[in-house]
Every structure is written in C-alpha cells, then in structure tokens.
C-alpha cells in the first residue's frame, strides 16, 4: 500500500511490513517530525487520528516567530505620507510585512510584541477597511486599541479637533491613527502630541498604508516592480490613494498611466512623472495591472461629470475594456467599490484576475508592520 500524504506532506500515513496497524509520521511546520502508531487497522480511522493530532499541535503553537528586534531600517516615528520615503524605506516596510503575511495564515493569530501599548483609531471620515484592519492588526499583536467614534464624541458638542486630540494625548497613547477630510491634519497632530501618528487618509492628499498594501499585493502576485506598467483609472483628482500609489510605484521603478475624464485629472499631474490618457483604450495598452478608483462624490463640488451610466460606458472596467491591457492583466481597487460605475461586478469578482480581496488581506499584514515599526521607533526616541 502506498504512503498516504495529507496537509502538503506534513502528515504521512503508512504501514510497516508485517504490521496490521497504520503508522503516522507528523511534521508540524518548523518542527521536527515524529512517528507514532495510530493504533488503528482502518485507514479511515488512522487518517482521523492523524489529522486530529496535527490540528491539536497547530492550534496550540505559534510557528511564525516575530523577532523582538527594535532597530529598523525605517527610523521615523510617524507615517504621514509616501512622498518623503525613499526606495529602501519602502522596501523595508514591504519586506518586514512578509512575516505578518505568514503569521496571518496561522490558525492562532495572536502575539504579544505590542503588549501594553495603547493605540487610538480616530476617524473623522467613514471607513471599513482601514479602520478595521488597523484594529485587527493591533489586537493580533497584543496591543489595546480604542476606537474613537467621532459620531458619538464631544466633537458633536462643539469640541475642536485640536482639543479632541489633546484630550486623547493626555491618556498617553503610543500611537494615533487619524483619518480626516482636510489635507495635512495628521502632520499637524504629529507636531502637537508626543506619540506616533499614522495618516489613514487626509483629504485628497495621501493614504500611505493603502499604497504600501497595494505594493505588497503587487509584489506577492507579480514578484517584481521594475518596468511593470500600471494604469490608475478614474477620479485621480480627488484620490489620495492615486497620489500615494504614484509616489510609491514610481520609486520602485513602475511606469504609470493615469486615465480618466479631463475634469478628474489634477492640474499638477505633469509634475508627477506619469503619462496621462483620457480614454481607456490608449490608457490600458500594454498594462500589467489596472487599478480602478472610486468616483468620490463627496468631494466633487462644481465639477461636471458624466451620468453614472455614461461614466461606466467610457471609463468603467468591464471585460471588453480589460482586453485593451496585457493578456492576464490583474485588476485592483482600493475599495469601497461602486459596482456598475467604475467597475463591472464580473471583473471585480473574477478571482483569476481581481486582486481586490487579496489587497484587504495584505492590508492587515502591512498595518501590523507599521504599528510595530513606528512604536519601536517612538520608544527609541
Ligand atoms: N481603501 C480604503 O481606505 O477603504 P476604507 O475607506 O473602507 O477605509
């Protein structure tokens, strides 16, 4: 009888010559293998026993050991934008996140490297992905995370932004994550209180952890950046994601096309070193990746834009327009998506082409890396 392999070979079930009983060889990841008799004559029973034994071991162990080093190649106390980072700092964030990608694949996702640290999520704008992924990232590393719901806070009683932040600052946080509709608020806060600050989006300016998670997704799915051609499409004018991605991807050697209606392309686009297109056919030509953006209706004031139907016909990504890009080009979207406006559901949900859910997973790993690096740096100041 041939050996039976389960769990990618971590479990082998086999028989010794002249024995009626099935034997088990179990090799948990990063541990020595051991052999035992299953005590069963039936293969089905032996499989069950081996799987139970393996799962019991896996569920109790942490196999990804996160080094407790506190010296990092990025030495900043804050993460306010991508523009000020250099290539090796960006690469450090991506490389350092690898261990958290692996960690997040474990059954038990809990560590204590940020035990005793206090982190505040302060969001003055709606969020699903960024707010919750920072929360899960902090909790997986053992920190205490406090969500400040601005809708229920004393801001509604007339308290200023500054007073709110100074109040939180008096509780001695290690790190504040801030999202605000105005440009530069996270920088202002970093100059006001004595803890690390992460910009989780300031108006149409920057969203650095989104660009880092997008880069990690690209790295994991293509293995390279140099000379990748990436189309960023849609409402470039109001997109902090577009701006942070342009800064980051250009530093790593990608070629960027921006594509959208003239009214949604910023005036300073020529200073960003990208090629500009006003139609999808030319803009997507030879692209490896097509990154779609949401029309930010909440920021569009006094600008003429086509109806949603006309916009979809001209700029919405469906399979017909995706054919303008390279064969097998990959699709990204930072979310939240407006299905049927900037992207067709069939494209968004096609797991062979769309990286959208993978972006969300990579977001947790990137945010774990950011929390650890910045809090270590703050403690070393
Ligand atoms: N991509 C992004 O920032 O999503 P949320 O607005 O849901 O956080």
Image: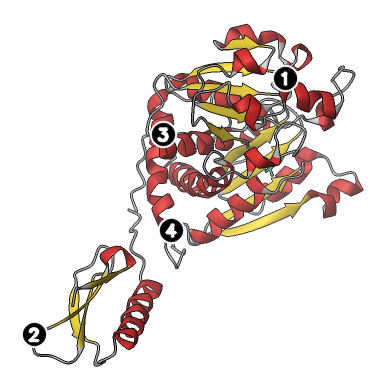
**Label 1 Cα crowd, 10 Å radius (few <14 / some 14-19 / many 20+):** many
For mark 2, what is the residue? 17
Label 2 sits on a secondary structure element that is loop
Q: Is residue 20 left or right of residue 371?
A: left
Label 1, label 4: how many angstroms apart (C-alpha)? 37 Å
Answer yes or no: do the residues labelled 4 and 3 have beta carbons within 8 Å?
A: no
Q: Quadrant of the C terminus?
A: top left
Q: Is residue 123 above or below residue 29?
A: above
* Residue 210 image offset from top left, x and y in percent: 58, 36
Packing grade of label 2 (10 A; few <14, some 14-19, many >=20) is few
Q: CA distance from mark 4 to mark 3?
A: 20 Å
Q: Between residues 48 and 211, which one lies in front from this camera angle?
A: 48
Instruction: Give the camera-side residue of 47 and 209.
Output: 47
Give the residue at mark 3: 222
The answer to whether 114 is drawn above or below residue 229 in the figure is below
Does mark 4's beta carbon lie closer than 8 Å to ligand 1? Answer: no
State whether label 1 is within 8 Å of ligand 1. no
Residue 307 visible somewhere in the drawing = yes
Is residue 84 in view? Answer: no
Q: Secondary structure at mark 4?
A: loop
Asked if 175 appears above or below 86 in the picture, the reply is below
């Amino acid at each position: 009888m041939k050996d039976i392999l389960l769990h990618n070979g971590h479990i082998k079930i086999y028989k010794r010559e002249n024995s009626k009983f099935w034997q088990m060889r179990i090799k948990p990841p990063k541990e020595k293998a051991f052999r035992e008799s299953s005590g069963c004559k039936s293969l089905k029973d032996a499989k069950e026993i081996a799987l139970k034994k393996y799962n019991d071991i896996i569920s109790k162990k942490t196999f990804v050991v996160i080094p407790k080093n506190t010296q990092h190649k990025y030495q900043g106390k804050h993460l306010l934008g991508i523009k000020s980072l250099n290539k090796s700092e960006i690469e450090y964030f991506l490389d350092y996140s690898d261990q958290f990608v692996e960690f997040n694949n474990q059954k038990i996702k809990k560590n204590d490297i940020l035990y005793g640290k206090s982190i505040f999520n302060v969001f003055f704008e709606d969020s699903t992905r960024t707010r919750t992924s920072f929360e899960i990232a902090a909790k997986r590393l053992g920190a205490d995370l406090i969500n400040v719901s601005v809708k229920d806070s004393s801001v509604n009683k007339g308290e200023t932004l500054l007073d709110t932040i100074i109040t939180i600052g008096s509780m001695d946080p290690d790190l504040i994550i801030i999202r605000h509709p105005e440009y530069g608020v996270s920088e202002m806060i970093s100059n006001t209180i004595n803890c690390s600050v992460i910009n989780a989006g300031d108006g149409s300016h920057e969203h650095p952890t989104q660009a880092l998670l997008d880069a990690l997704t690209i790295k994991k799915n293509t293995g390279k950046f140099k000379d990748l051609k990436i189309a960023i499409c849609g409402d470039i004018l109001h997109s902090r994601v577009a701006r942070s991605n342009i800064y980051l991807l250009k530093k790593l050697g990608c070629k960027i096309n921006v594509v959208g209606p003239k009214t949604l392309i910023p005036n300073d686009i020529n200073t960003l070193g990208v090629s500009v297109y006003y139609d999808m056919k030319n803009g997507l030509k030879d692209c490896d990746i097509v990154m779609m953006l949401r029309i930010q209706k909440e920021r569009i004031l006094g600008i003429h834009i086509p109806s949603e139907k006309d916009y979809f016909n001209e700029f919405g990504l469906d399979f017909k327009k995706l054919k303008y890009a390279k064969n097998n080009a990959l699709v990204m979207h930072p979310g939240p998506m407006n299905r049927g406006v900037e992207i067709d559901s069939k494209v968004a949900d096609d797991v062979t082409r769309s990286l959208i859910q993978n972006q969300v997973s990579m977001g947790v790993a990137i945010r774990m890396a950011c929390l650890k690096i910045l809090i270590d740096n703050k403690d070393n100041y």
